[in-house]
Amino acid sequence: LLLLLLLLLLFCSVVVVVEMQLTVWVDGYPKVLSNLTEQSTCQEVIYSLAQSTGKTGRFVLVEKRGKMERSLAPTDRLTLLTASALEQNNDIQYLLYRLDPPPPFDYSRRVSSTSSLPRPLPESSLHPFGAYRSSLCQRRTVSALPVPARSTLPLDSNRINKNARGEQCRAPPPSYEQAMQSRAKNLMRTKYEDSAEILETVKNQAVILQEQQEIMNKLDQEIVRWLQRKEFCITEEQLKAQIAEREEELKKVIFNVESFQKQNIESQNANVRVNVEKLTVEIRAATAECQRLESYLADRTAEAQRLEKEIEIEQLHISNKDLMNSINSLDVGELQDQIDVAEETKQSKLAICEQLRFQLKHFNMETLGQCLNGLKLLQKQSANETKDHLLDVTNSINNEALQLQDSKNSSVWV
């Protein structure tokens, strides 16, 4: 009875731990990891996932927070990262990626994975614990099938007591350096060696499944043997009481989980409210800034219109001024032309005066010569004749001088 109670408590604790463990997405399907401790590293998680899926190659575990992804180192501890993410209320996911392409598979040597699996024990309808044995067989059959989309992958190699089983458990995964060395060796092999390695891995998995099946059979036989003993027979009332206790414990666990989820939801709602308030304040500030910019733009538009009007008025004034300047330039040009014409007339008249002076001087010189000649003639002639002739010459000179003076004064000075 004590052993049965311990098994039931262990089963309930395992169920609770599995529900609270880490989820890793492999090829688009979630894989739940159980029995994670603070010392569990990223390297151990990768080896456990690779062994459960039967894949070989180079893998990397990626941490995704929102839209950001980060590759994890082999020595990173996932429990600490998850705890820090929960404290910061961040949505975190872990993804397993394969860096190198999968090796080619030889289909001619492919062995069916179900051929090596052990068959469940036959059900006996006459057995007093037939229903219990049928459930055990069904559980063994499900565990022997390929890994489903959401399965639990134990990491602790000491989960089952070795003394109780009498069998040796699987060895822990190799170190990171050994894995890299084996990977370097695998890269040098041919495709036939790779296919042989895959076949060997499948065979090893079949052997492991067979060992687990044998262990489960032994445990089932032990449970049936203890249940068949009269001194450990449990009455129906005791079973109901134990079931009620398990239900109460399960309700407490569910209540704790719901309260934890409720606290997370409340904290998330508070963060959302704070973010909404911040966004509201930012929107109001942006709206006020837009209104201020619109008023500033309206003022600048009015100022631009006023400046355009002033520019038009100034352009009109400048055009009028240019027109007046052109008119004034035309008047000045005409006056300048008239002045030039008058100057030319003046110069021509001065030239005429100079010519007349020269002619008068020449005529005076000739007249003076004639007078000298007449005086010489008068010395030879008589005084009367000389006087008469001199008077005539003097009169003629005076007349010519008067005529020349009249012709000179007839010009107009400007």
Image (cartoon, rainbow, N blue to C red):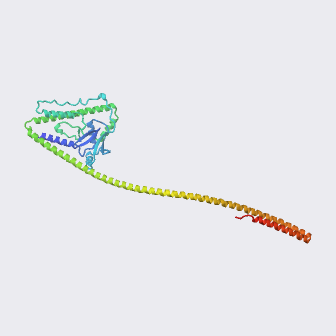
Q: Is residue 307 visible?
A: yes
Q: Position of residue 225 (x, y in %)?
A: 11, 35
Pick out the residue farthest to the left: 231
Q: Is residue 396 above or below residue 327?
A: below
> Could you tell me which quadrant the C terminus lies in?
bottom right
Q: Please report the residue visible at 18 percent of the width from the left and 31 percent of the height from the top.
A: 120
Q: Quadrant of residue 93?
A: top left
Q: Position of residue 216 (x, y in %)?
A: 18, 35
Q: Quadrant of residue 390?
A: bottom right
Q: Please report the residue visible at 26 percent of the width from the left and 39 percent of the height from the top.
A: 30
Q: Position of residue 152 (x, y in %)?
A: 23, 39
- Residues 403 and 43: in front is 403
Q: Is residue 302 above or below residue 405?
A: above
Q: Specify whether 396 is left or right of 302.
A: right
Q: Specify whether 50 is left or right of 126.
A: right
Q: Position of residue 280 (x, y in %)?
A: 30, 53
> Could you tell me which quadrant the N terminus lies in?
top left
Q: Specify whether 252 is left or right of 88.
A: left
Total numbered circles: 0
Pick out the residue farthest to the top: 108
Q: Is residue 174 visible?
A: no
Q: Please report the residue visible at 64 percent of the width from the left and 60 percent of the height from the top.
A: 335
Q: Specify whether 368 is left or right of 302.
A: right
- Residues 395 and 122: in front is 395
Pick out the residue farthest to the bottom: 383
